Amino acid sequence: MKKIFLASLLVLGLVATSCDDYLDINQDPNSPTEENMTPDMMLPAAEMNIAHSYGDYLRTVGGYFAQHYSQEFGTSNYLDYSQFNQSAVRSNSMYRQLCTRAMNNLKYILQYAEANGEWGNYLAATVLRAFAYQALVDCYGEVPYTEALDLNNLTPHYDDGQVIYDGILAEIDNALEKASGSDQVATSILFPGSTAKDWIKFANALKLRILTRESGVKDVNSKIAALINENNFPTKDVQFAGCWKNEAGQANPFFMEDAFASYGASQINIILNVALLNTMSITSADFKDGRLAAYFSPNGSNAYAGGVSGTNFSTTANYKTAYWCRPNAHFNDPVVLISVSEINFLIAEYYAKNKNNAQAQKYYADAIKASFAKAGAAGYEDVVAQYPLDVNNYKKAIGIQKWVDLSGYNSFEAWCELRRLGYPEMSNVKGEQVYNPATDAYNPDVVAPGTLYHPINANPALTSILQRFPYAESSANRNQNTPTYPGDNAPVFWAK
């Protein structure tokens, strides 16, 4: 069985042999011998599978679904996302990258580490596996888990999201019991030259996110309290940084995907959405959020303008490319898995739920402060004042500010938290009120700060935002155990 499993890895091209190879995940590596298949080879490959799917595809679609982004003039690559549509085909590559490539690498590491008592490697692989499964549940609701990765079962059962969440939490706890902070960890891009100490902190932050996300449907208050009391969280963002190169195939994956005119691609797709712009720039007469300039470039007139979900303005002569604002993306930007600001927002939410106003206010302010520090911007105190935290309606302030914070680096998590917290709220404003394609009338002020709006030609199945992905065609077409798709408007388990 080991030889069969090794062969499957090599056929899929999952193993890399140098640092550059890990970055270029699309090339076929040299085939290693069975004896030198070690976690030092497999861990960076798994990390890059996750970094590319999470930092590119999920960030991109999350940005459209969360109304951080809209579609550039004259191009239509992501217009369907802008209208809150997702097809079973569009997520195929991401699904294979996580469910097949990353998971098989991690499965090998877990088997090797357990057989050799390498508990630092066991923990690292467990945390990355849990991270990937959490993202998959948050996309699809249900995916194969208990019967997944079995070469003898080509039609695995799809597990309910709650079962998977409970399972990965148990996996993390089991790995934490086995590992100690001094245990060595194999070559890693996420934590270069690390012991298990960094992975323990990452594990705790991931547990905090998972528990908080399911806290609306399950009583996990005591478990969250224990984590917060232990207070062993990362003090720096958990991110893939310092590993990207200014070369095609080796740059930040989000930067490469949207081309940014650096690697020969001609189309430009992503622009600033009016919903995000209005929230960041119209909070008071004289105030503009300092993170706006860090996240997006001004337009050709050195001003800020926001595009409208559901259209690419392709029929207008007034709103051309130079009118819109592009993300400030760079080849060496980090791919952020969990940030310090997100951790502080999660802790603030816990204290707000438990009516501890002083602690809730502290961590809320700390979260915004960390967000501004990450952006290299000043004036976080003004944002705290403009969006004060009310513990009796904590979802509003935390939801809006987390949405703004994540717009600069992790829009996928913003889409997840939108579905869970319900903020920014979906207003009654229709996209055609913001921009009328027939008359070319553009009226961005109808979108109130801290609210969303219905896209032009929006997905007719929805009453608000998209709630889930259809099951990936690459899995569903070959698996008779794929459940009936519940529909775009059906929440995943933690958002019910």
Image: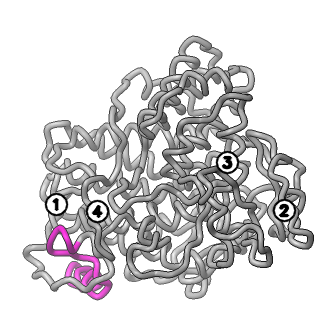
Badge 1, how many Cα within 10 Å: few under 14, some, many 20+? few
Question: Which of the two marks, 1 or 2, is nearer to us in this view?
Answer: 2
The answer to whether residue 158 of the structure is visible from this angle is yes
- Which SS does the magenta portion mostly show? helix
Image coordinates of residue 38 in percent, x first then y, are 14, 67
Image disc number at residue 115: 1
First in sequence: mark 1 vs mark 2: 1
| Region rendered in magenta | 1-21
> Disc 3 designates what residue?
276
Amino acid type for the residue under numbered disc 4:
Trp
Decide which of 284, 211 is in the foreground and name it.
Answer: 284
Question: Which of the two marks, 1 or 3, is nearer to us in this view?
Answer: 3
Amino acid type for the residue under numbered disc 2:
Tyr
Image coordinates of residue 414 in percent, x first then y, are 59, 49
Quote the CA–CA distance across marks 4 and 3.
Answer: 28 Å
The part of the image, by quadrant, that contains residue 360 is top right
Quarter of the image with the N terminus is bottom left
Q: Is residue 431 above or below residue 376?
A: below
Amino acid type for the residue under numbered disc 3:
Leu
First in sequence: mark 1 vs mark 3: 1
Quote the CA–CA distance across marks 1 and 2.
Answer: 61 Å
First in sequence: mark 4 vs mark 3: 4
Question: Please, which residue is most extreme toward the left here?
Answer: 35
Left or right relative to 397: residue 342:
left
Image coordinates of residue 80 in percent, x first then y, are 70, 74
Image coordinates of residue 278 in percent, x first then y, are 72, 44
Badge 4, how many Cα within 10 Å: few under 14, some, many 20+? many
The answer to whether residue 142 of the structure is visible from this angle is no
Decide which of 250, 345 is in the foreground and name it.
Answer: 250
> Disc 2 designates what residue?
435
* Residue 6 inside the magenta-drawn segment: yes
